[in-house]
Image (tube, rainbow, N blue to C red):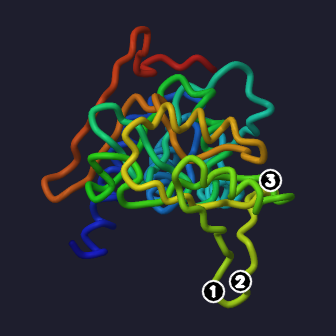
Amino acid sequence: MADDDRTVWKRAAAESAAASVPDGVVVGLGSGSTAELMLAALAERVRGGLRITGVATSARTAALANDLGIPLLAIDDLQGTLDMSLDGADEVVLPTLDLVKGRGGALLHEKQVALVSRFRVIMIDESKLVQALGTTVAVPVEVVAFGWRQTALRLTTLGCQPTLRRQDSVSNLPFVTESGAYILDCAFGAITQPAALASQIKAITGVVDHGLFVGMTERVYVGGANGVATYDVAPVGAQAPVQPTHE
């Protein structure tokens, strides 16, 4: 599988997700390479007359949305909930649509936006589909900078090997999130009970949040060699946002 193939597949998934956005909604805008492809497709629809307001999950996303002419609203100025959100993921398990996210470092903001979204859409290429979470990527865990080594030790009791994420290999400085925290990339191997592990990680003192998104996705667009496949989860009461809740 070539990198060029993955880019084509990601773009196809991103364009399918962007095409699903109805007129008049307030939409969460994710972070990362696939989300940026989605922003380009969404901006084209905005130029064609689509009326939306975006809530960005990162400063980079906000800057790109501004450059592309997508109107934005700060999450703290939001009245009620978001109609929907669009984002990428690092791993997806079928049929539950549970995720690992956070390789881009925006997991906390992405989770905050997902939590206030009525309908959550994920866009990936087919290489991100896995049999179990944790098999191809470590789980990012955002931690308070103070005492991070002690937090890392507490995380090891859950059966992982935490590694402090660095900005780059030259400076060797810790990667710092937009919230001023560090990220520990925690290698668990295949995760058989993601909901239980998510609760255990969150309960550790020093942890801000983690990249396990369990039960937080309604639809996934998967780009691949055969086109784009769509996978839905429909919990009781969940509906696609066919009618905007904001004017």
Classify the position of the C terminus by image quarter: top right
Q: Are marks 2 and 1 in contact (CB under 8 Å)?
A: yes
Say which of 223 and 247 sits in front.
223
SS label for mark 2:
loop
Amino acid type at circle 1 is Ser
> Local crowd at mark 1 within 10 Å, few (<14), some, or many (≥20)?
few
Side (left or right) of 3 relative to 21: left
Alpha-carbon neighbours of circle 3 within 10 Å: few (<14), some, or many (≥20)?
Answer: some
Out of 176 and 71, give the one closest to the viewer.
176
Label 1: element kind: loop
The amino acid marked with disc number 2 is: Asn
Q: Position of residue 81 (x, y in %)?
A: 64, 22
Image coordinates of residue 178 in percent, x first then y, are: 76, 57
Residue drawn where x is 30% and y is 74% of the image: 3
- For the image, the number of numbered tags is 3
What separation in Å lies between label 3 and label 2 (alpha carbons)? 18 Å
- Residue 232's place in the image compared with 56, above or below, is above
Pointer 1 residue: 169
User: Is residue 94 shown left or right of residue 195?
Assistant: left
Instruction: Quickly name the residue at label 3.
Output: 144
- Mark 2 — residue? 172
- Which residue type carries mark 3? Val
Secondary structure beneath disc 3?
Answer: loop
Between marks 3 and 1 in the image, the one whose residue lies nearer the viewer: 3
Left or right, residue 21 beside residue 172 = left
